[in-house]
């Protein structure tokens, strides 16, 4: 669809054609030529606007007389009616053809793809005032709906299209943004052109007032026979049987899963108990070793004191003749434990580094200078935020002791892109001219692809758009994308 300005030009051109044609009831003969020339100028503008608004190529010929004006207006009205009724008929045929698919046990994504095809077919229908916004609202709900809610929305679109197809359409009010075209679609003479157009607040699809709006049903084609009801009952019964089988399978799987979980818990408890026993044995051994060490120290202290007393009691000349004995220094418990100071662990040096967000999509060898050395941090595709890289012995020494270096890779947050785990938030700037307008456009993504979205015309967060976020490890999958809409 083109912008509102194109639709506004078409509206003014059609209104001008009706007004000029009505002047011939009051104008003199000498003014006919000037009015016809002005009429033909607006015809050219209609020819230019029609394919842009309706994607409908039409060629309206110039007129040479007042009578041809009426025929031209009738022709334009028939084209307007065709622009609405043709896509209604085509979309109804599409829904009937795909009815079994939409109501079958298909995946949500497959149904959404079919509804996307239908939405492309009814672009002219969404121009109908009040009807169009309803269809757009339902379609926006379909894009995020799942399961039964998705199928109810599809059913609602189908019922709306069926109702339009069964209506006897004589007048259509078209709306694009704030511009409205509200013209009678059947013109019988110049005099009827001067009639006031229908009020834009009236019902969009109006019935022919000369007929009583009744629904006539052919008994052979519209009512279900007893045989059809029985067949449908058998289908429902068969489906219930299949559902019971599925439930039984699910129940068995749940029991199997519960058994596996219980077995796993038993193994974990057994492993935990064994671990506790091992730790208790180690504590007992350490206590015994500590007692033995204390006994050894006491024995050495006693022996040292005995030798000291013996030397003091021996005469000097006897001491010179005997082999000199050096006194053993007393063994200090604190000094013996101090020898194991190097076994105490030391905290590593932790450095956080901001990594550009696009490196997580392409992969990159990030080079960083720390403590006068260059370190290469391998940023792989799908790397998680806050990943740690340990370089043993490369941290800044503390008291002459070496320690490890840990580099933490943090995703760099910018005004355009922000990362939250596997989700990506992208800021999109929209011109103020599009505020309060709903339109479809393609948004360029960070990886070079584009995504078609429907902009609602309001600031805020739109989404999620599944599969357009951050890569998730080596799974090949991606998180969700959210668009932050802002107006310049």
Image (cartoon, rainbow, N blue to C red):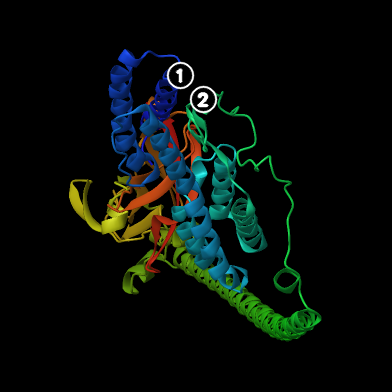
Residue 390 in the image, given as x and y percentages of width and height? 33, 59
Q: Closer to the camera, 36 or 419?
A: 36
**Residue 193 x %, y %:** 50, 26
Residue at the far front: name it: 29
Residue drawn at x 55%, y 65% as measured from the top left: 108
As helix, strand or loop, the secondary structure at mark 2 comes to helix
Q: Which residue corresponds to the image point at 30% horizontal and 42% vertical from the top-left?
A: 59
Residue 359 bears which disc, if any?
none
Tell me which residue sits at (70%, 45%) in the image.
Answer: 211
Residue 191 badge: 2
Find out whether the residues at labels 2 and 1 contact each other: C-beta distance under 8 Å. yes
x, y percent for residue 150: 61, 59
User: In the figure, residue 74 lies in which quadrant?
Assistant: top left
- Sort mark 2 into few (<14), some (14-19) or many (20+) by Cα contacts within 10 Å: some
Would residue 123 be seen by someone viewing this image from the given angle? Answer: no
Residue 376 is situated, as x and y percent measured from the top left of the image, at: 22, 56
Side (left or right) of 90 relative to 156: left
Nearer to us in this view, 264 or 399: 264
Q: Which residue is mark 1?
A: 25
Instruction: Classify residue 317 by image quadrant.
Output: bottom left
- Position of 425 relative to 274 (above/below): above
What is the quadrant of residue 483 in the picture? Answer: top left
Say left or right for 174 vs 161: left
On the rendered structure, is 459 left or right of 218?
left
Nearest the eye: 115 or 263: 115
Q: How many marks?
A: 2
């Amino acid at each position: 669809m083109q912008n509102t300005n194109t639709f506004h030009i078409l509206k003014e051109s059609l209104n001008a054609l009706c007004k000029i044609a009505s002047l011939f009831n009051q104008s003199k003969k000498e003014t006919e030529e000037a009015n016809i020339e002005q009429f033909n100028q607006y015809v050219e503008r209609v020819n230019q606007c029609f394919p842009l608004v309706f994607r409908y190529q039409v060629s309206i010929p110039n007129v040479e007389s007042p009578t041809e004006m009426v025929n031209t207006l009738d022709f334009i009205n028939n084209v307007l009616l065709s622009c609405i009724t043709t896509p209604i008929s085509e979309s109804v045929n599409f829904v009937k053809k795909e009815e079994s698919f939409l109501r079958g046990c298909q995946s949500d994504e497959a149904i959404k793809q079919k509804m996307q095809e239908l939405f492309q077919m009814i672009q002219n229908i969404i121009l109908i005032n009040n009807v169009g916004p309803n269809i757009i609202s339902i379609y926006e709900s379909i894009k995020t709906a799942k399961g039964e809610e998705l199928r109810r929305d599809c059913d609602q679109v189908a019922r709306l299209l069926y109702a339009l197809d069964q209506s006897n359409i004589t007048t259509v009010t078209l709306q694009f943004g704030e511009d409205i075209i509200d013209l009678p679609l059947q013109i019988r003479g110049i005099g009827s052109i001067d009639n006031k157009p229908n009020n834009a607040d009236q019902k969009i699809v109006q019935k022919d007032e000369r007929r009583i709006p009744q629904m006539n049903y052919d008994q052979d084609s519209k009512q279900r026979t007893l045989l059809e009801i029985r067949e449908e009952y058998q289908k429902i019964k068969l489906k219930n049987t299949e559902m019971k089988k599925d439930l039984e399978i699910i129940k068995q799987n749940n029991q199997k899963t519960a058994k596996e979980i219980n077995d796993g818990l038993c193994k974990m408890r057994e492993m935990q108990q064994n671990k506790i026993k091992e730790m208790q044995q180690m504590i007992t051994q350490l206590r015994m070793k500590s007692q033995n060490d204390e006994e050894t120290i006491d024995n050495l202290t006693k022996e040292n004191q005995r030798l000291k007393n013996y030397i003091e009691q021996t005469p000097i000349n006897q001491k010179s003749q005997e082999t000199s004995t050096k006194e053993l220094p007393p063994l200090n418990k604190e000094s013996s434990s101090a020898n194991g100071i190097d076994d105490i662990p030391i905290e590593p040096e932790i450095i956080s580094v901001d990594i550009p967000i696009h490196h997580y999509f392409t992969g990159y060898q990030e080079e960083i200078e720390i403590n006068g050395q260059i370190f290469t941090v391998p940023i792989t595709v799908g790397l998680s935020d806050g990943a740690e890289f340990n370089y043993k012995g490369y941290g800044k020494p503390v008291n002459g002791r070496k320690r490890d270096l840990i580099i933490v890779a943090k995703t760099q947050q910018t005004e355009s892109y922000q990362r939250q785990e596997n989700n990506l938030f992208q800021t999109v700037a929209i011109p103020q001219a599009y505020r309060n307008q709903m339109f479809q456009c393609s948004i360029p993504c960070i990886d070079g692809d584009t995504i078609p979205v429907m902009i609602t015309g309001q600031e805020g967060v739109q989404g999620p758009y599944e599969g357009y976020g951050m890569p998730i490890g080596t799974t090949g999958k991606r998180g969700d994308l959210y668009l932050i809409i802002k107006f310049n």
